[in-house]
Image (cartoon, rainbow, N blue to C red):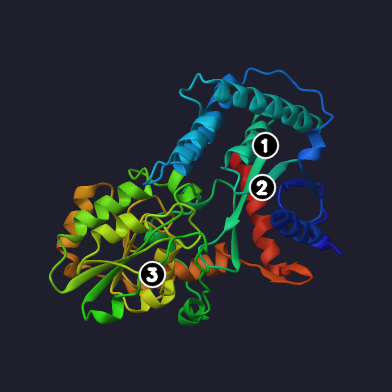
Amino acid sequence: MKDAKYNSKYPRILFYCDTDHNKSLFGKISEKLANTTLINQQNIENIKRTPCGCDKIIRNIENDYSKYLQYKYKTPQNSLRVLFKKWQRLGASEKSYQRRYRKYKIKKEFEKWVTFFHLSDCDIVAAWCPIKPKRRIVFEAALICNKSLLYFEDSPIPGYIICDHKGINGGLSLKKDIKFYEKFDYNDNINFDQIFNNIKQRKPSLKKPKYLQSKILKFKKNTIYCPLQVQDDTQIVQYGSWLKSIGQFIEIIYKASRKLPDDWQLVIREHPSSDISFTKNLASLSDDKFLVDNTSDSIEIIKHSKAIVTINSSVGFHALLKSMPVIVCGDAFWGFKPISYSVSNEDDLIKIFTNIDSLKINSSAIKKYLNYLFKQIFIPINFKNTGYTISDNDIKLIYSTSIKSLNFYN
């Protein structure tokens, strides 16, 4: 039964669902909030399009779509199959038949959603990771129709999600000013060690080549750990900042590792879910300062490390739970001093590696920041055979964020 506290005419939220995962999650949230409805692609199948001057929006969405495809097919070994697949979906230029046809399809769908939202009396449209092109169509149409937005995404800690009115990941509305978080004083201390120890890592993909054996324990050196990410993930495509590919990142990290003191080593690990393998390239670079470990559990590598360097991987956030120095090369909501070290170019990274012994941490600031996140931002979501469960107290966070959304977009 829906909480009477939220049984008001305002706000009314439409949850856009396009996978079993977000349908199940949004369904559970919808059960607890009044004035909510689940919608999907079927809602616009028989709707007449509303022509509108939206060429710039369509072009931007298609450009983003093509950007994801370019990242997806940017591999170390450009086989004929990969090159054909890339041409098949992108063509030879921006004016290719493939891209022009995709713009037509996007415009057709966009204009149908515009009609739908013009007819709807909803206040807010919510979706899961709606910066991805297909979901972005829905959000852009909602904005045209003066609807407010709610962004949902996984938090860096498994078992928690984030609801925000402005964006996801590096686009979150969170302040990057430690003074803001120092104002909050929570009496009950959260056991971050326990949270860290409960993190379960994904198993390596069986599609990848045979992994190199772990070398970490054979060296008694200070270790800086570099977890690689999925190349065409939103974290890289949208928030990679000055880094444009995993291949480029590997080259820069290898060059920086040459500047590490003699008693330091860098351990690099491929993402277990990545379809693009850099194993051969990494193996050719491997030496006593640049070690490749695709077999060890990521949490175990963190335990053996003194620092982490990443574009913006959630593994870097995991290291914050252990109050460990983290170097962030891309955009991350936790990428600011004194929480972590942010670098904006290759020279900055080399300078940090050269002086890596001088890295310091502010454990007090990190704990205050983490306390705020776990109390005010991260929403625990449990999944059992019967589906998702979410507490009434955590529903209040979603409700309060929906009010922020209304104020922000109005």
Residue 238 visible in the picture: no
The numbered mark, 2 or 1, whose residue comes first in the sequence reads 2
Q: Is residue 251 above or below residue 378?
A: above
Q: Amino acid at mark 3?
A: Ile
Q: Which residue is mark 1?
A: 138
Write down the residue under mark 2.
127
Residue at position x 19%, y 49% from top? 347
Q: Which residue is mark 3?
A: 366
Task: Tell me the residue at 29%/61% (across/down).
Answer: 283
Task: Tell me if mark 3 has few (under 14), some (14-19) or many (20+) residues whose alpha carbon lies within 10 angstroms of its own.
Answer: many
Cβ–Cβ under 8 Å for marks 3 and 2: no
Dot 3 or dot 2: first in sequence order is 2
Nearest the camera: 69 or 172? 69
Q: Residue at x 76, y 22 (%)?
A: 49
Do residues under tags 2 and 1 come within 8 Å of each other at their CB atoms?
A: yes
Give the farthest residue toward the left.
262
Relative placement, left or right, of 162 versus 297 is: right
At mark 1, the secondary structure is helix
Q: For the residues marked 2 and 1, what is the alpha-carbon distance in whole angstroms?
A: 9 Å
- In what quadrant of the picture does the N terminus appear? bottom right
Examine the rendered structure and indicate whether residue 109 appears above or below residue 27: above
Q: Which residue is at the front of the view, 254 or 15?
A: 254
Contact? badges 1 and 3 (CB < 8 Å): no
Q: Residue at x 64, y 43 (%)?
A: 149
Residue type pointed to by label 1: Val
* Residue 61, image quadrant: top right
In the rendered structure, the answer to whether residue 67 lies left or right of residue 341 reads: right
Three-letter code for the amino acid on which mark 2 is drawn: Ala
